Amino acid sequence: MITAEGRMETAMEFNIQRSTFLEGIQKTLGIVERKTTMPILNNALIRTENNRLRIVASDREIGLVADYDADIVAEGEITVSARKLSEMIREIQGDRIHFVTNDNYMVTMTSLKAVYKIPGVPADDYPTVVAEEGMPLAPVKAEVLKQLIRRISFAISGDDMRKNLNGAFFETGRQGDAFTIRMVATDGHRLALADADLGMPGFPSLEKGVIIPRKGLGEIRKLLEDEPGDVSLGLQPGYCVIRTDSTLLKVNLLDADYPDYRRVLPTEPGSVVQFEKDTVLHALRMMNVISSEKYSGVIITLRDNTMILNSTNPDVGEANDEIDVSYQEAELVVGYNVSYLIDAIEVIDTERVVFEIGQGMKPGVIKPLGDDHYLCIVMPLKL
């Protein structure tokens, strides 16, 4: 039924597969706010219309709309605590859930002999998440976006005082007839850059890049997790949209200017060492055991195809290791934050890694051997 104001009444009833309902509610958990001046933002909006169940979540910066098949008995809408609803659905044992509300906004969920009751809140004050009908969208492989996000997200700044670094810089370009997309992230101590060739015309072009906030990027990554094929991407001033077959995610962009990352890309090659990814990762993780918030450095000595690692922490102890690498230049001693090196190397997919170590206090560059689509720049420590 429709109220005089044009909104649907909260009375509603439907039946749905438990796994489907759980999937939809779990998509909202990263969006709903735990600490907010608007308690209703802790809730997910549940609406039934046109024989479909719609689940909506919003924190005013990120909005999610997901549609699912359900057996609709009575249309309506209500908001319910997303976290409690998720916990209840997870613990229910039956395959199907019967969901019904009453005039006092009390929700009753039953499955087999189990019954849950949870108070709801009218949907009148819930933020509207506009589906942006008519917005131009372009297809892009979900795997491409996932790879870009995975390779750069560790370098996003967590310093709220530096708003423009609290997200990933996203830009598009063209190399000949091919279209490319690039993501960049930096916290001032390291910079990760990843790009991909799309090879398709008609992809949204950006006169200048945009900044996708850290939280929004995390929600995009989760949405893409189980997507095997293409998704649709749309970019407009102020926001971006990702659409899958059943879900639309709208993310407000950061209103800030990203620093010119090209200025920090090294123009002169440093001393080059090549090594097996897994061997060096294991050695660095050994060093990391000694690390603490105060002491997090690793000293690397290179000479005659050998890498010697040392980490010393007066409060914890000392770790040493020696591994074979490919290095034939003059002996070199340099220090880095061990966690930064681990982060940069972990996301590389090739077996061998190239590390160009800058002279003096110039940054080092870590990249896959034979792959120009990723690099990470890391500032050294003063010895």
Image: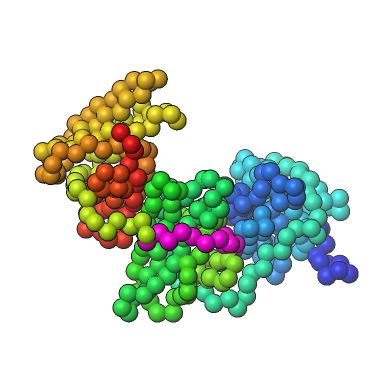
* Residue depicted at x 45% and y 48%: 187
Q: Residue at x 33, y 36 (%)?
A: 382
Taking the view exactly as shown, the residue that stands out farthest to the right is: 4
Is residue 253 one of those drawn in magenta?
yes
Question: Which quarter of the image is occupied by the C terminus?
Answer: top left
Residue 180 vs residue 243, the one in the foreground: 180
Residue 317 visible (yes or no): yes
Q: Position of residue 343 (x, y in %)?
A: 37, 44
Residue 284 appears in the rendering: no
**Image coordinates for residue 256, horizontal then vertical, percent:** 56, 61
Q: Is residue 369 left or right of residue 348?
A: left
In this orientation, which residue lies closer to the viewer: 337 or 232?
Answer: 337
Lateral position of residue 18 relative to residue 267, left or right = right
| Total numbered labels placed on residues in the image | 0
Residue at 15 percent of width and 38 percent of height:
331
| Quadrant in the picture for residue 243 | bottom right
* Main secondary structure type of the part rendered in magenta: loop
Q: In x, y percent, where is residue 261?
A: 40, 59
Q: Is residue 58 above or below residue 284?
A: below
Residue at 73% over, 42% down: 116
Q: Quadrant of the N terminus?
A: bottom right
Splitting the image into 4 quarters, where does residue 276 fall? top left
The x and y percentages for residue 294 are 43, 29
Is 176 colored magenta in this rendering? no
The magenta segment is 250-262
Up the image or down, 195 lies above or below 85; here it is below
On screen, residue 344 versus residue 14, left or right, reads left
